[in-house]
Amino acid sequence: MLVIGLMSGTSYDGIDAAAAELRLAGDTLRLKPLGMVSEPYDPGLRDLLAGALPPAAVPLADVCRLDTRIGQAFAATAARADAELCGGAAELIASHGQTVYHWVDGDRVHGTLQLGQPAWIAEATGLPVVADFRPRDVAAGGQGAPLVSLVDLLWLRGRPGTPVALNIGGIANLTAPDGTAFDTGPGCALVDAAAREFSGGRLAYDADGALAARGRVHGPLLERLSADPYYARPAPKTTGKELFHPGYLRATAAQPMAGLSAEDTLATLTELTARTIADAVRSVVATEVIASGGGTRNPALMRALAAALPGVPVRVSDDLGLPSAAKEAYAFAVLGFLTLHGLAGTDPASTGARHPSILGSLTPGRDGLRLPARPEQTPVRLELE
Ligand SMILES: Nc1ncnc2c1ncn2[C@@H]1O[C@H](COP(=O)(O)OP(=O)(O)O)[C@@H](O)[C@H]1O
Ligand SMILES: [Mg+2]
């Protein structure tokens, strides 16, 4: 089955679409990556989104506009991916949508909201769409995240040692082979926020880690930020831009930050990000890290991470055949495929839910909705072709 996975993470930089040919063979799910396309949000939509994210209060009219325009943007990217990667033969779209709010209270998640109305995607492509993956796990008592963990577990099963899958998006999350999975804290979120602030909005991120590489880590600022109680909280736990938003730095670290250069601030935030990820990796006694996400393209961050993890090799998922920029989009293609086949997309050990859940809501395509029979065997591993 040809499936397109659509993803936009908490960095809301744009939409990633990955196409995969997926096939069940006994207890193995085979994935042939067909490639990816990425489409940045147009600046107007990005500004509307940026202005709507926590802690902003947003009129429902804007929520409606966002749901519609994000849906249309996802639809355009899906149609392009179908034409360019699948020759117009895609059969299913799996859309994560854009998270705008993850309602966390202490160690409980009460709700989670992803926008990007799937009707637009079904209309533009004619294909059935699986969307709204997270709420079902929340309804089952889980965190609704990290959802890529099941795919990571299937994918890394059988690899020797304790390989840990790490995705560095706006928020960073990891999955260990025993199913332990959680958000470690900021991935690119704080680095991006500081780059944008110091450049007066000109830089969306610290390109190639250039600013951080020229700066020096500021001890008191690092100490102040490291004291956030989120890092010490036990898993399962998830976070988002509700906590690590641009105002977070001003609110928690104004004093040590005063008068600091862009370079030193970026060096410090890069070090904080690397250390909190490394602490999380050590807490699950990892023997290797398989990293993915846009953060892997920041050499200053990857150097700091390697330095904070002596003896634990840090690889990128590309080395194992899964392009790191597209990994989450591929993971959602897999989750959509599982849903269509009536198979669960979560491991309760990862999300903290009471039970595994078949995820998402289905929007019929132009020809309605034909559900394949539930396979006799539940896949226990994912193999790349
Ligand atoms: N060349 C680069 N140099 C430094 N950072 C980069 C580079 N390319 C991407 N990034 C980082 O990756 C982030 C986007 O990563 P992504 O995996 O798309 O996150 P998300 O899933 O949250 O959207 C950017 O905000 C930026 O911080
Ligand atoms: Mg992104």
Image: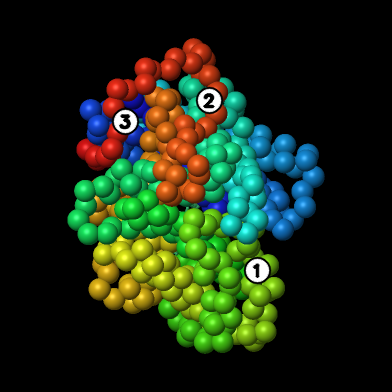
Label 2 is placed on what type of residue?
A: Leu
- Front residue of 26/178: it is 178
- The image shows residue 287 at horizontal and vertical percentages of 26, 64
* Residue projecting furthest to the top: 367
Q: Nearer the viewer, mark 1 or mark 3?
A: 3
> Dividing the image into 4 quarters, which one contains the C terminus?
top left
Q: Residues within 10 Å of mark 3 (few under 14, many from 20)?
A: some
Q: Give me the C-alpha separation between circle 1 and circle 2.
A: 37 Å
**Sequence-wise first label, 3 or 2:** 2
- Front residue of 337/366: it is 337
- Front residue of 173/53: it is 173
- The image shows residue 76 at horizontal and vertical percentages of 53, 33
Q: Which residue is mark 3?
A: 378
> Dividing the image into 4 quarters, which one contains the N terminus?
top left
- Above-or-below relation of 264 to 365: below
- Above-or-below relation of 170 to 116: below
> Considering the numbered disc 2 on the image, is that residue within a helix, a strand or a loop?
strand
Residue at 50 percent across and 27 percent down: it is: 129
**Sequence-wise first label, 1 or 3:** 1
Residue at 66 percent across and 34 percent down: it is: 68
Q: Which residue is mark 1?
A: 248
Q: Which residue is mark 2?
A: 362
Residue at 51 percent across and 79 percent down: it is: 268
Label 3 is placed on what type of residue?
A: Thr
**Sequence-wise first label, 1 or 2:** 1
> Considering the numbered disc 3 on the image, is that residue within a helix, a strand or a loop?
loop
Q: Give me the C-alpha separation between circle 1 and circle 3.
A: 43 Å
Label 1 is placed on what type of residue?
A: Tyr
Residue at 63 percent across and 59 percent down: it is: 106
> Considering the numbered disc 1 on the image, is that residue within a helix, a strand or a loop?
helix
